[in-house]
Image (tube, rainbow, N blue to C red):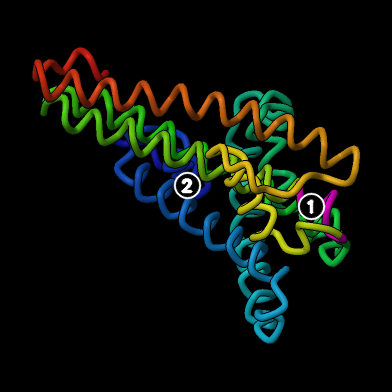
């Protein structure tokens, strides 16, 4: 006779157990909710979208309700609750909800801090890692595609975080909205010399981080292009794993 599993344990398994039939669906769904909530935070800093404030507020509260439920289930289901709470993703999950729960989401710094929840998309890397191992049997092209997806997720996350930092420190200058901060970060990462220069110490430090991220991005790009060339010339799957 099978042991009955509580609904909370069932949801926890869907969140954490790769062998659970709902694991991928659950985590991809949370990834979509994360992206939508981050986009809402980004767009609400743009004057042209101020008229949609009520819609953004609904998105925010629905997303936070989902994130809070997920957080509590992860805490409840963890064998070591303290280990999860103080882990990287535990802290990110907490930061994703606390500004809204405290009612401070209208403060500039904490409004920007909500975009830190974009780091939740890094959970998707776990799914892609699992998919990469399973797709090794289907050939190098599938693995190369997954590597590219990982690169895009990392690049998107970096641009959002760095662009938000520029918005936080340079909101009265060249980054009056988060999209402007993101575009500024992107300009620097691709080597555009026409980009503006920061006016604050925080902006200067952020610019150093942007340049460091650009170096990492360049290295990853060379790796992916090199793997594609090797695959084209040799057809070897080992080169792109």
The mark found on residue 11 in the picture is 2
- The magenta span reads 166-172
The mark found on residue 98 in the picture is 1
Rendered residue at 61%/53% (across/down): 183
Evaluate whether residue 204 shows in this view.
Answer: yes
Image position of 112 with respect to 231: above or below: below
* Of residues 66 and 167, the one drawn nearer to the viewer in this rendering: 167
* Of residues 172 and 100, the one drawn nearer to the viewer in this rendering: 172
Q: Magenta stretch: residue 88 in it? A: no
* Badge 1 density bin: few <14, some 14–19, many ≥20, Cα 10 Å: some
Q: Earlier in the sequence, mark 1 or mark 2?
A: 2
Q: Secondary structure at mark 2?
A: helix
Q: Secondary structure at mark 1?
A: helix
Residue 88 quadrant: top right
Rendered residue at 62%/40% (across/down): 188
* Of residues 125 and 181, the one drawn nearer to the viewer in this rendering: 181
Q: Position of residue 157 (x, y in %)?
A: 56, 42
């Amino acid at each position: 006779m099978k042991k009955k599993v509580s609904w909370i344990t069932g949801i926890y398994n869907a969140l954490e157990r790769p062998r659970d039939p709902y694991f991928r669906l659950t985590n991809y769904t949370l990834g979509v909710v994360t992206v939508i909530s981050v986009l809402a935070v980004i767009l609400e800093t743009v004057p042209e979208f101020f008229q949609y404030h009520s819609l953004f507020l609904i998105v925010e509260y629905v997303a936070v309700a989902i994130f809070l439920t997920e957080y509590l289930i992860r805490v409840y289901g963890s064998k070591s609750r303290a280990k999860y709470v103080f882990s990287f993703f535990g802290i990110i999950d907490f930061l994703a909800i606390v500004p809204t729960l405290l009612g401070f989401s209208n403060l500039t710094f904490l409004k920007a801090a909500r975009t830190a929840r974009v780091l939740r998309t890094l959970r998707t890397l776990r799914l892609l890692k699992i998919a990469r191992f399973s797709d090794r049997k289907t050939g190098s092209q599938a693995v190369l595609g997954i590597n590219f997806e990982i690169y895009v997720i990392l690049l998107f996350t970096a641009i959002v975080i760095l662009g938000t930092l520029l918005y936080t420190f340079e909101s009265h200058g060249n980054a009056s909205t988060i999209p402007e901060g993101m575009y500024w970060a992107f300009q620097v990462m691709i080597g555009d010399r026409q980009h503006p220069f920061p006016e604050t110490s925080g902006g200067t430090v952020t610019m150093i981080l942007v340049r460091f991220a650009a170096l990492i991005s360049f290295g990853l790009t060379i790796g992916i292009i090199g793997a594609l060339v090797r695959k084209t010339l040799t057809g070897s799957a080992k080169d792109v794993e």
